[in-house]
Structure formats: structure tokens, C-alpha cells
Amino acid sequence: MYFKNLLLLLCVSIITSNVKAQLFTLKDVASGFNKPVDISNTGVPDDKRLFITEKDGKIRIIDETGSVLPTPFIDIDNKVSSTSNERGLLGLCFHPEYTINGYFYVNYTNNNGNTVISRFSRSTNNENLADPSTEKILFTVVQPFDNHNGGEINFGKDGYLYIGMGDGGSGGDPGNRAQNPKNMLGKILRIDVNTEDVPYLIPADNPYKDNVDTLQEIWSMGWRNPWRFSFDRETNDMWIADVGQNKWEEVNIEPAGQGGLNYGWKCYEGLQEYDFSKCDNGTPFVAPIHVYDNKSDVGCSITGGYVYRGSQNPGLFGKYVYADYCTGRFWALYKNSNGNWQNDDLADLQNFHYATFGEDISGELYVASLSSGRIFKISDGTSSSATTSLTPNTIDILINPLSNTLQWRMNAEYKGDITWSIYDLQGKIIKTVQTQKSEDTQVFTADVSQLFVGEYLLKNNVDALTTKRFIKI
């Protein structure tokens, strides 16, 4: 679906989002992880292990018995910078011929603050250990800011490696990098790693192969921060969740093999124009299939998931399961019998900052909690239950992005002291503010000049659902 002007944009925006409650729970699998940000499997049919990527630089294994092995699969903490919200060891995937070559690939931020895509090899003597000395760096991308580093890295069924790159950070893509065809930032890249002679090759069917005006690694462009994308293991369609700026979180779908598309940022945010000052009105931008408003307290930062293709939860089969990092709400997005996109409200769970999803070899789904260090398995029943009515108090961030002063409005009707906490995206409290709410006091301010550039969450101690994301520039 494409949009070029406001008229067609309005047609896209009327796609309905129906709510259908289901029995949906998370079952504890393992705990004790330090900021888990990725869940992977080797792709080997008889391998029941899960590989958990920790942001600070370790990859750990949950074995087939559900035990967490005491020795990490690999520890590259000395190579990784994880000092800011969105930096660290962010992504992991295994080569399609892992059983033969032992290769796996990682996406991390190095000690200079730049993105590194590299390959390591497993140990020749122990399948539960990798050899840190085997690193082969494929390429490095300079990051101008410490947020919007992307992080996803994944193989498609075509055998090529796909890499998600954020727009370089700050707020509003100040360098217009996502629309710049000669910059890797704000793109999804596609490369051929099946070579030993050079770091990588350009696939012959890449959309910009031999194009002198566009980097040949680019598969698609116009992304803000595609933190997590995945391939439907049945259709190979790519599902991409792009984290929004101030207002819209979005889900995008790319039919299998259709590269060369432009997904709109920063010309559009969600289904609305954002900044067209440097945009070509003739460019056919691809519209998201679903958006939600992060000013409605439904959420404020999307965590992309997977189309469920397992066997244990028939009520979810063929549906794209995803969540919001800020609120702990889960949804399932799919086409209904009428051919329209439908978004089922699965659950509103205790918010543990669900940062990533993953599949096991059988297609069962898992989700990781960044703040609690726990890994959960998704379980769903097909029986219906009453829809939960959520009536949280609401916050409006009045200026966003902002520089030195955070200003917000609280729309709840109550009095008394309120403790406000500012968290980084790792769930760490950076600052607390005490306010007095009265009928005459609805707008509050806080000095945030000491905060580093990046994204933060604002919460209060009255309503756990009241969470807002803001950007410090």
C-alpha cells in the first residue's frame, strides 16, 4: 500500500482495529539475565537451545532442559559500549549452514560508539562455547548520536543477511539520513556473507546493485528505528516494527523479495506528514499496515514480534504478535475473513519492559523482560473472555523533543503528592521529581539539562499505565 498525498492517506487511516480479548499468559522459562535484548535459535532441527543476548556483551544459553548454562556462549564485553540507552550487543543470528560452518553474526556498538556487524565461530571442541578470537568484522557504521542504533540482524530464506539500522538518533532525524540514499542509517541492508575473499558481497538482485546514486547494500529506506523485524517462516514476508517519534508507533509489512521500497520517515510518521521540507512528492512511500497513538496511553515504544507458526497455541496461528515496551500491552495483528487488518488486544500485563521476542526451532514464541532479566514463553487459549477496560490517567508531554526543561500535563482528577520517575530505556531510574497535584495545578516542569541526549520514560507512582516517552536533544 502506497501513499503520496493526504487524500490517499485518509483512505489508509480508516482501517479499523478491532479488539477481541483472549486468554493470554506468559510462562516463566528462565531468569537471572542481565538486560536481555534478543532471543535466538540456531535453526538446526534437533537443537532445542535458546540463545539469549545480553546488552552488556554476553550471549548465554538456555539448554534443552530449561537450565541456564553457567558459562556464556561468548563474552565480548570488552568490545561493546553499553553505557547509553540504546547501545550495546543488540542482535544475534546464526548462519543457515551453522551445523557445517559454525558461523554466527552479531550487531553491536563498539567502544567508539559505532555499529559493528561481525561474524564469530563456535568452538571446535564444545558446541556451547564460541571462540572470541575468530571475529571477522564485515563493516562498521559511524553513529552520530547514541540512540536509534537499530539492532536487528537476520537471515532470510534467500540466504542473505538483513540488517536494521536506525536513523542515527537525536530526534526528528536532523541529518535527514533515513532519506539519504548514500547513507546506511535509516535503512534495512541486505548483503551476501557467503564469501571468504572479501567481508561480503552485494547480492545480484539487490534493488540498487550497480546504482551509482544509492548504496548497493540498501534493501529498503525511510526507517526511524526498526528495532525488531522478523520473517514469517511460512511466507517469508518481512514484518517491521518502527519506533515512532512523538505520536505514532507503526507496524509495516514487506512482501517476500520486494526490495527497493521507501517507508516514509521522516516525510511521514505513521500515516501523517511529519517533515516534507526535503522530501520528493513523487516518491512512492509505503504506508504502515497498522499504527497506534503513543499519546493515548496504549503505549509509547513498539516492540516488534513474530507471525506465530507454532503448534501449541492455535488461537494465534498466522497472527503477528507484538507488544509495547512502555505499558506491557500485547496485541495480535492479522487479516480477518473480510480481508481487513484486525488488531486483537491480547493482554495488558505487568510491565517488565518487554524488549524483544524470539522463536524456538518449533516456532513457539518467547519474550524477554529487559528490567527483570526474565524470559517468558507465550501461551494463549482460544476461549474468549471479557474485554478489559483500561482507563488510565493520562500525561501529555507539552514539548517533545526537548532540550533542558521537561514540561508535562497530568489530566487525572486527584490531589496529593505525586512522585514522578524518569527512566532510561533500560529501566534505570535517572531522576525523581516530587509534585503536588491540586485542581489548579495540572502542568509540571523538571530540569533535565543533566540528562544525556537520548530517549527516556516518564512515570508516576499513582498509575502504572501512565507512561510517556520523551526525547532529550
Image: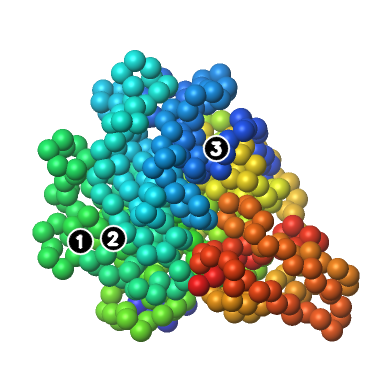
Rendering coords of residue 42 (x, y %)? 39, 29
Q: Which amino acid does label 3 sit on?
A: Tyr
Q: Distance between the residues labelled 3 and 2?
A: 30 Å
On the question of residue 261 being in view, the answer is no
Q: Mark 2 points at which residue?
A: 184
Tell me what residue is drawn at x 70 percent, y 77 percent. Answer: 445
Q: Which colour scheme is used?
A: rainbow
Circle 3 crowding by C-alpha within 10 Å: few under 14, some 14–19, many from 20: many
Work out whether residue 359 or residue 145 is closer to the camera in this orientation and state it: 145
Q: Mark 3 points at which residue?
A: 366
Q: Name the residue under label 1.
A: 215
**Element type at marker 2?**
loop
Contact? badges 2 and 1 (CB < 8 Å): yes
Instruction: Please tell me whether residue 176 is drawn above or below residue 455 in the rendered image.
Output: below
Tell me: 404 left or right of 102. Answer: right
Residue 133 falls in image quadrant: top left
